[in-house]
Amino acid sequence: MQFDPALAAQQSFSRADTDDELGVDWDEAAEAEATFSSNAGATARTAYEELLALAARYPNAHSFQAFCIFITWQQVTEETIAHHFQTGLRLCETFLASPDGRHRADVEQITELYGSFRDGLGLDEEDEIQVEFRKDTPKGGD
């Protein structure tokens, strides 16, 4: 990875504050982020879920959406399970498909993370059967 997702998360979170993306729900987001950042285990997971719930309520809050993608990568590194990879993949697809209003750095970094989430789920890998099938499939002129 060409960037630090934790630093990218902090930058995106700050932009979400500056741009007032969450309006009256900002205090709730700030409290959940503080809990997420200063804890681990079940406490951090609960705060993470609260942040994702806020993101679902604000689909056009691009910086906050980016923040949630970056912290999802942190969840992957904390607890490497398919659910986190799937969540990251879904968040990336939604973010990358959204219209204008996104920061260029976020788009580039999230595009990179998107590939990492796909790799984590094995979506770009061929298994042995697929490799053998490709070898045995006649090519043009065979």
Image (spheres, rainbow, N blue to C red):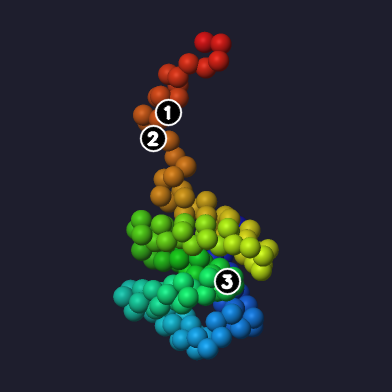
| Marks 3 and 2, the one that precedes in the sequence | 3
| Marks 1 and 3, the one that precedes in the sequence | 3
**Labels 2 and 1 touching (C-beta < 8 A):** yes
Quadrant of the image containing the N terminus: bottom right
Kind of residue at badge 2: Asp
Q: Which mark is residue 60?
A: 3
- The Cα atoms of the two marked residues, 1 and 3, are separated by 41 Å
Residue 100 falls left or right of residue 23: right
Q: Which mark is residue 127?
A: 2
Whether residue 125 can be seen here? yes
- The percent coordinates of residue 93 (x first, y second) are 52, 57
- The percent coordinates of residue 108 (x first, y second) are 63, 58
- The Cα atoms of the two marked residues, 2 and 1, are separated by 6 Å
Kind of residue at badge 3: Asn
* Residue occupying the point 44% across, 40% down: 125
Task: Return the residue at label 1.
Answer: 131
